[in-house]
Amino acid sequence: MPIFLKTERLVLRPFTGTDADVDRLFALDNDPDVMRFINGGRPTTREAIRTRTLPRLRHDCPCWEDRGYWAAEERSSGTFLGWFEFCPLDDDSPAVVELGYRLNKAAWGRGYATEGSRALVDKGFTDLGVERVTANTMTVNTGSRRVMEKVGLRFLRSFTGDWPDAIPGSEHGEVEYQLTRADWQSVPRGAGQAPEENAADAALFGRGAPGQDW
């Protein structure tokens, strides 16, 4: 199985579409704490995982002949931890990518979110022709906002999403963070990098674009 990226403690690999991946994603998306800032903690059916979630996670990005989502495994044990997103907003251009992740509770508070996100950002600016990284989350999702800041992203704007179903906290709106290539280049590698986040910092990125199955 091809590996997209390795860090000190993580392996990021493509989803295969097997029943094992369906089972892993089904468990992940049916933990109400994991899904709190995504859909308010509502359950997801196995059929939705198979027909909607997995095809999205297996989508190929023509602009760099690879995918935008990867299963995250613990390097030492092979344990499934969740997934990371580093996906071009335009299939035909790698200039602007969206960063995100969804990790199971066993992985929270161990610095995996920061470690994986930072490695993706560095690879994007170094190897993939990325010019700007963006990430969105709910305003009240302070954990994810801290992770974004640790990775180097900075607050850009507040906005209100047109969501079909309101969830607790959505009345406070959304926030967008970004990191440009110029800003990334201006910071020495390793500067300001905290080794791990606390439990609150392991919260999840936001709901994504309206209508997406997050």
Image: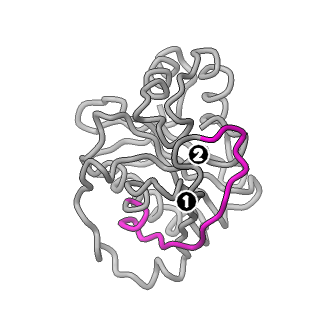
Under mark 1, the amino acid is Ala
As measured in the structure, the alpha-carbon distance from the residue carrying label 1 to the one carrying label 2 is: 11 Å
**Residue 144 vs residue 175: left or right?**
left
Determine which quarter of the picture holds residue 163: top right
Under mark 2, the amino acid is Arg
The residue wearing badge 1 is 135
Q: In the image, what residue occupies the spot 37% across and 54% down? A: 143
Residue 122 higher or lower than 161, as above or below: below
Residue 164 shown in magenta? yes
Q: Which mark is first along the chain, 2 or 1? A: 1
Q: In the image, what residue occupies the spot 44% across and 29% down? A: 32
- Residue 144 in the image: x percent, y percent? 42, 55
Disc number for residue 70: none
- Residue 146 in the image: x percent, y percent? 37, 62
Q: How many marks?
A: 2
Camera-nearest residue between 66 and 165: 165
Mark 2 crowd level (few <14, some 14–19, many ≥20, 10 Å Cα): many
On-image quarter of the C terminus: top right
Residue 158 higher or lower than 39, as above or below: below
Residue 185 higher or lower than 110, as above or below: below
Q: In the image, what residue occupies the spot 73% across and 61% down? A: 93
The residue wearing badge 2 is 207
Please tell me whether mark 1 sits on a helix, a strand or a loop. strand
Q: What stretch is highlighted in magenta?
A: 147-166
- Residue 84 in the image: x percent, y percent? 48, 45
Residue 19 higher or lower than 144, as above or below: above
- Residue 76 in the image: x percent, y percent? 23, 36
Mark 1 crowd level (few <14, some 14–19, many ≥20, 10 Å Cα): many
